Structures are given as C-alpha cells and as structure tokens.
Image: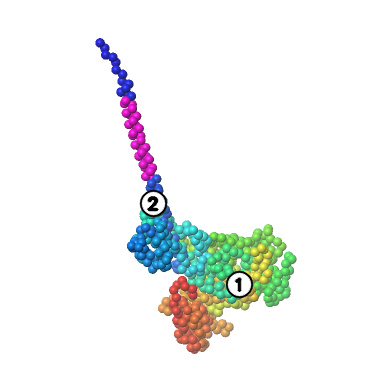
Amino acid sequence: MRLPRRSHWPRRLILIGWLVSAGAVVGRAAMLQVENAEWRQLSAEQHQMSRPVPSIRGSILDRDGVLLAQSREVVEVGLAPGELRRDEDGFAAEASSALQSVLGLSPAEARRRTGSDDAWVVVPGRYPTTVRAGLENIRGVYLGRDYERFRPHGDLVAGVLGTMLEDRGAGGIEESYDHILTGWPGEEMTLRDARGVELPGRAVPVKPPVPGGNVSLTIDVDLQEIAREELQEAIETTGSKGGDILVTDPASGEIMAVVSIRDGDAAGLAAINTANEPGSTLKPFTVAGILSNEVGTLADLVDIGNGTWRVAGRTLNDVYPKASILTLADALRVSSNVGVAKMAERLSHRQQYEMLRDFGFGMPTGLPIPGETSGILRKPEDWSRQSPASLAIGYEISVSPLQLAMAYGALANGGRLMAPRLVREVRAVDGSLIERPEPRLIRRVIDGRVARDISRVLVDVTESGTGTRARLTSFAVAGKSGTSRAYRADGGYADGEYFATFVGFFPAEDPQLLAYVKLNGPEGVYYGGATAAPVIRATMEAILAAQQPPVDRRVLAHAARRPSPQNPVIRFAGAETAGSGAESARWASGEGTEVMVPEVSGLSARSAVRRLHTAGLRVVWDAPGPVLGTWPTAGTLLMQGDTVSIDVGRIERGQSR
C-alpha cells in the first residue's frame, strides 16, 4: 500500500520566513552602522570646528634695514568664570587681583568680569605679550594670540606704507605687496559643547602658519625725516595749505624721501597721485626740444620787447623783464615767458609734443603704488592755436611731482629717463631673495651734450637767475623755479592762489641727489624762487649735515667750490664722526680768518651742525638729539677750519627730533 505523498511547501515557507527575517536583521544592522557613522560625523561637526590661524605679516624696512612697519604679537584675554578658583564667599580673588595688577582693570571692573554668570567672558582690549607671565598660570584665564601693525616712526612714512583694513593692505606698499607680506594662514581645531559654544583652551594645532615676506624700500628714514621737517617748516612760514617734497637719486631713479602734507595731514601721497600745471619748471624741456631738434642754440637771440607778447589772442608777460634782447640761455635763466615761447615757435607741433611725451609726461611712471596719476598731455590734434605757447611755459599740461622729478633726473644724469624705484628688494621669511628690481632705463630722451648744456644754464639760474635762494655755498646747484595758478574744484583758476615749485640737483657736475618742492597756496610772496627755493637749500644743507649722508663723499670732495674773493668760506660737506675713518669731503675755506663759535645750545643736532658749518668750522658729533653745548664753548675765537665738538642729549630712535 502506497503512503500518501507529503507536501514540502510548509517547510519551504518556514525557511523563506527565516531568510527574510535574517535579511531584515542584517539589513537593519548595516543601516544602523551607516547611521552611526553619520551620527558620529555629525556629532564631530557639532563638537569640533576648524578655523584658520593668522600668519604674522611681513615687515617693511628702509634702505638700511630700519623698521618702518612691523606686525607684533598681542594678547587677548578671556575668562571662564565657572573654572576660576573661589574662596568661601565665592570671590575669585586670585584672578581679580591679577586682572588689576597685570591689565590695569579697576577693582569694580575686575570683580564684575570674574563674577559673571556667563560661561565665557572677554576682557576688552589687546595687550602686550608681557602680560602672559602674570596670567598664564591662573586657572580659568585663557590667553589668545593675534597680531597688530606697528609703525615705529608714526606717520613719517604713512603715505608710502598705506594702511590696513580688515587684515588686508589698503594703499601704498601694504596693498601693492599684500600677496608677499600676508604669508599663509595655518589651521587649528577647536572643541565646542552641545550648545555649539567654543570650549576655552581646547584648540589643537593642525597646520602651522607661514609668516609673510619682508619688503625693503629705497626710502632713507633720515632723509625722510629731514624732508618732513623742512616741508612742515616751510608750510608754516609761508602760510601754505600744504605741499610736497621728493628726494631722489637721479642716476638710479631711487626715491629716497617723499612727503605730502595737506591741512596738517601727512598720511596722503599727493606727490604721486595728484597732478597740476608745472609752470616755468617745464621750460627746460621746451629748451631741450629746441636743442635736440637743432632748430636753435642757447646763443640764439630772441627779442622780448618790453616783456609782453600777444600770441593767438593771448598775452604773455614776463615778471621781471631784464632786457629787450636775450639769448635763449638767458631767457631760461631769468625764466622769460616771452623769450621761451617765441623760441618754441621753431618747433613743429609734433616735435614739441614728442619731446614732452619722451620725458614721461602724460603717462604713469609705473611706480608700484595704487592710484598713481598719469597727468594730462593732449595730442597735437586736440590743441588750440594758443596751445604751443602755453605748453612752452608749462600751461595746458598737468604733471605729478614724481613725473617732474624723474624728468629732471634725465637732465641731471646725461639724458636718460629712469623708471622710479621705491622697492629695493623683497625677501621670504627664511631670507631667500624673491625680487630685487634693478635700475631700469625707460629711454634716452636727449643727447648727453644737450643735457650738460641745459644743466649749466640751470646752475646759472641758482647763481644769478630766479633761483638764487637755492644756492649752496659749498656746491654748484642746478635748478629751476616755477609758479602756476591753482585750479578751483569747480573748474577754472582760483583767484590769488598759486603753486610755488622748485626742482634742484647737486653737485651739478656729478649729481648725487635731486630734490623737488611744491608749496600749495603760499600767502604773500608766492613765486617759486622766493618760497620753494629756500626749502631746497635747507633740505640739501640738512642732508649734508646728517651723520651719514647717502652721498659719495669723494664726489663731493671733487665737486666742492674753491675759495674766491666772492666765495671766501666753503661749508664742510658732511659731519665727521670721531674715529669713523670715513673719508670726509675736502674742506676749502678762507683759512686764517678768525671766527667766533656761535651759540647752538638748545638746537637740534642737525641745525647746530649747519650753523657751525656756516661759520667755516669742522664738526664732530656722534648722535642725534638736542644740543647741550659745544667744546670749545660759544664765544671762543677760533680759526676757520678748526674743529668743534657738540654735546648732545641722546634720544631713542623713533622719537621726533
């Protein structure tokens, strides 16, 4: 008998059920593992935070390594009141006492901060690193690190340096070289509680920051200080609204000092980013065009009549007509508007335009400073019938002080227009060289012979022309004065307002330094030869009286004037430093003449040196500072050529002097 066949489906269904259940369990377990990883990541994100660590910004230095701008570490102080040690009355005596003695908080303020119910309290202010020693071992007190920009010389070089806005450079070198100075930030991890509040003292470094590189300028901080002092004094003396001064090396184009002052503020840089009509300071370039294009010579005669000439509906006048017939050289020497403009008629419009353009007018110099102006030089097709005569004497054109200084540098160095240099070198934090711009020739504008001929006439300007107040007893100075009318803000000329300008370089035979000065709106006498020229002379004298003038003393020794009946005393070219061994400039004087040691007590060292040099006496001094006296004492009779030592009260570098 066959048994009935048994069905396998119940067992299969049970197996399938087991497999489904097992799969569900495994799937759920896998899902839980994934969710757990996500939760761990989310938890980590909630409790950890990555933040950048600022790098220390690189320094800016002068040509000799003197610090002009530097980032220094500062300390930020925070409190976790719940962690502070407290006495039986709940008073955090240790922390409160430290906040008073180390940070200078008042007792009430210290008690309020330490007694707060908040989890975290920030103490206002940023403090020097010296506070760390008094606070770092107190439980519940946390010290943060940050950096602030420090300028040891205040606003002395503010215009060149620029400023900082939200940790970025704004204006000047700070902006132009921000990518070098900034460096690279680091990274750190911080911990937060369940509410997302950062836990103090729980930061973990991840990547250290890399400090920024250093930028060395061509600026000489001593020359900058001299230029600032002389310009400020001139503004106050003449009642001017402001002014600009530049000192350059005409051979290399290096800018050694640049100062702009407007309404008492020296933080701007109008010498680079503002242009105006140059007036008579443009006349040498008109003469250069005449000579270079061989349409005239310095000996050619020009009839100026009575000093008045009407051309194209405009009347030109000479301020001080000397004679009715002048040579071109004399027309430039006495700054005859009529004479120079008449001779300029020999130039074609294209020749006149190209000469001015080749000297760099109408285009930026390429200096690495934001906001440099290109000035205005219109093309001949845009000229009126009056334009050639106006341009010949410095009108219908606008130039910046920097452009004019560079153009005069071409006259001084034999006809080579150099690009201005403000940065000497750039180095990484490890000292490796990143950049060292070399002197750059833009173009040869005129032949060396033409440059020398014009320079000789510019010496005559300071000897017997319109710039005699820029004359140095020691050396021949080549220069030119200029006076131009000021514009109103709404257009047109302002009544009774002028720019007074003078540009000079010395020694004329082998120029070492070039100085440009402009005064805005001097009161009373406003001519450049009367107001700006004395600033050039005072600046040059102060530079020569400096302890370490940035000039070649051998050149000065060779270029020094020799004594003559008209020039019996020649001032010593630079201060001697006892035991320095440096070669001093050759001193020539009417030796054998008896002089009295002048009283110089109370003067600055530089002013005292200048006064003693004027008397024909050598000077020994070894530091800046106020003069306490001299040896021999004031009133002593000495022979010209004798040496006087000055006693100074030393001051710390960085203080005004």
- Residue under label 1: 240
In which quarter of the view is residue 331 placed? bottom right
Tell me which residue sits at (70%, 71%) in the image. Answer: 317
Q: Amino acid at mark 1?
A: Ser
Residue 163 is situated, as x and y percent measured from the top left of the image, at 50, 62
- Tag 1 or tag 2, which sits nearer the N-term? 2
- Residue under label 2: 193
Residue 96 vs residue 527, the one in the foreground = 96
Residue 154 is situated, as x and y percent measured from the top left of the image, at 49, 68
Q: Amino acid at mark 2?
A: Asp
* Relative side of 488 to 636, left or right: right
Residue 169 is situated, as x and y percent measured from the top left of the image, at 50, 60
Q: Secondary structure at mark 1?
A: loop
Q: Secondary structure at mark 2?
A: loop
In which quarter of the view is residue 75 placed? bottom left
Number of other residues with Cα within 10 Å of mark 1, as a class: few under 14, some 14 to 19, many 20 or more: many
Q: Magenta residues? A: 14-41
The secondary structure making up most of the magenta span is helix
Tell me which residue sits at (42%, 66%) in the image. Answer: 108
In the image, residue 291 above or below residue 546: above
Residue 56 vs residue 559, the one in the foreground = 56
* Relative side of 38 to 501, left or right: left
Residue 505 is situated, as x and y percent measured from the top left of the image, at 56, 72
